[in-house]
Image: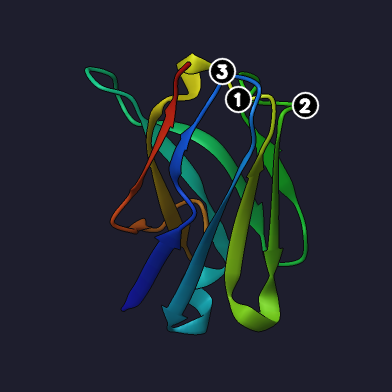
Amino acid sequence: QVQLVESGGGSVQPGGSLRLSCVGSGRHELLNVMGWYRQAPGAERELVAWIIRGGMINVADSVKGRFTISRDDAKETVYLQMNSLKPEDTAVYYCMSRTHFHSGISWGQGTQVTISS
């Protein structure tokens, strides 16, 4: 079992920044891979970025160069620094974790990010 608790969502104007945090608790191996997905209204949930314990990272092309993912393994926490935000980044952002890429995914409750002028 794992619990993921997100924080840091909110509303900003285009060009602004937000930092999301997600604290994981539970079985250590279930937090090997941590990351973020997002789901806009009427759209499917899509990958934003993931990071593996030890540092390997993958970032979606749509956010590359604007979003940075990082983690603090001692705190079992993953961060998503979002800069140069655009209206199309508006979505509910979900923290996720899994043991490896063939295992089930655990999800956080989601945090709303709204980009609007």
Q: Nearer the viewer, residue 42 or 32?
A: 42
Instruction: Please tell me which residue is depicted at 68% across the width and 83% down the height of the picture.
Output: 74
Q: Residue at x 49, y 54 (%)?
A: 8
Disc ID at residue 86: 3
Label 3 sits on what residue type?
Answer: Lys
Disc 2 residue type (three-letter): Gly
Image quadrant of residue 77?
bottom right
Q: Which residue is mark 2?
A: 65
- Disc 2 to disc 1, C-alpha distance: 11 Å
106 over 117 or under it: above or below: below
The mark lying in front, picked from 2 and 1, is 1
Instruction: Tell which of 20 and 74 is nearer to you.
Output: 20
Comes first in the chain, label 2 or label 1: 2
Tell me the tag on residue 72: none
| x and y percentages locating residue 62 in the rendered image | 61, 19
- Judging by the rendered image, the residue that carries numbered circle 1 is 85
Mark 1: amino acid: Leu
Q: Earlier in the sequence, mark 3 or mark 2?
A: 2
